[in-house]
Amino acid sequence: MERMQAVQVRAPGGPEQLTIGAVERPTPGPREVLVRVRATALNRADTYQRRGHYDPPPGASPILGLEMAGEVVGAGPGVSRWHAGAAVFGLLAGGGYAEYVAVDEELLLPKPAELSFVEAAAIPEVFLTAYQALFWLGELSAGDHALIHAGGSGVGTAALQLTRAAGATSHITASAGKHAACRTLGAVTTIDYEREDFADRLLDATAGHGADVILDFIGAGYAQQNVRALAHDGRWVVLALMGGATVEAFPLGQLFRKRGTLRTSTLRNRPLAYKQELVAAFAADYLPLLQNKTLQPVIDSVHPWTEVQEAHERMEANQNIGKIVLRVGP
């Protein structure tokens, strides 16, 4: 039995529960490749899993980490797309905080030579989440208005760039210190959620039209304002419930009058075939823009994985603009 180093959670709790220790190295199954991980990146889901509030899907690695970049070092039966030494980055259901990870070959993309492993590791989860939410669920089109909550987050910074590339107009909510960064990524309206009514600001900015698409990570806490901010025939896409799951008085009548659509989504527990299709569609539409750096991952900070506790503390303090990346290994 071969071993590797990986970040482990000693017991559900705070960042102090994270440590690095030896675990069994994965063996790639049919149509899976084994990747030597060079970098991985934090996602809010990692902090929930660390606290015991977000179990991995059945069959997924219990190790934290939903994305990575590295080099192919082995393959299971039936692999045809990759060879040893290929530099790749990709989406995971778990296992990124480790020296090695086994991943379905169709969830990997070739790392552009123009990008470092650190940059590539900051792409998969946030860009694929934003792509799915904006286009597959939100049906964003050129000329639309998109309201992106948590505009300074990893998904938010990816969504801003995708919205601009699609010819739509973006408006964001974020703490005031993140507004300048969001404007450089294309935000036309920047709203301080701590001091301003975002629905009022959004309606003013769009001359009463509202948002054709809303990307929402807050949930219940923003429900009333989101419905008020939504355009007629608008699509409200909920990706997380950071502000609670229960709405005391849901404005269903107002949503009905606007013919609005409420959609919810996760990505981690989607079927493999769905993820494969999503990765392929994103690659066809946007991999060239990553190669020429029209789209770029926004990286807040880079830490050796021995500083994983500090990296989690930074995310939970909401200090980051964009992605927090871990360099894996010595």
Image (cartoon, grey):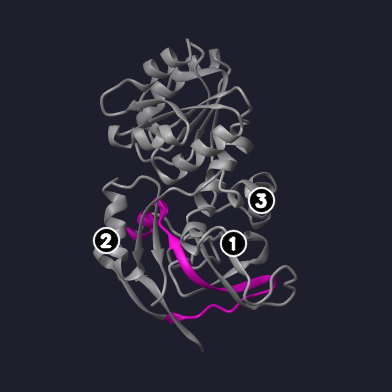
Determine which residue is flagged by label 1: 113
Determine which residue is flagged by label 2: 310
Q: Amino acid at mark 2?
A: Glu
- Which is more foreground, mark 1 or mark 3? 1
Is residue 30 or residue 280 the one in the foreground? Answer: 280
Q: Amino acid at mark 1?
A: Ala
Left or right of residue 202, residue 123 in this image: right
Q: Is residue 50 visible?
A: yes
In reply to whether residue 39 is colored magenta, the answer given is yes
Relative height, residue 103 to residue 177 (above, below): below
Farthest top residue in view: 207
Relative height, residue 104 to residue 22 (above, below): above
Tags 1 and 3 touching, CB below 8 Å: no
Q: Earlier in the sequence, mark 1 or mark 2?
A: 1
Other-residue count near label 1 (Cα within 10 Å), few / some / many at <14 / 14–19 / ≥20 = few
User: Residue 171 at x, y = what percent?
Assistant: 45, 26
Other-residue count near label 2 (Cα within 10 Å), few / some / many at <14 / 14–19 / ≥20 = some
- Which is more foreground, mark 1 or mark 2? 1
Q: Amino acid at mark 3?
A: Ala
Q: Element at badge 1?
A: loop
Q: Earlier in the sequence, mark 1 or mark 3?
A: 1
Determine which residue is flagged by label 3: 283
In reply to whether residue 210 is colored magenta, the answer given is no
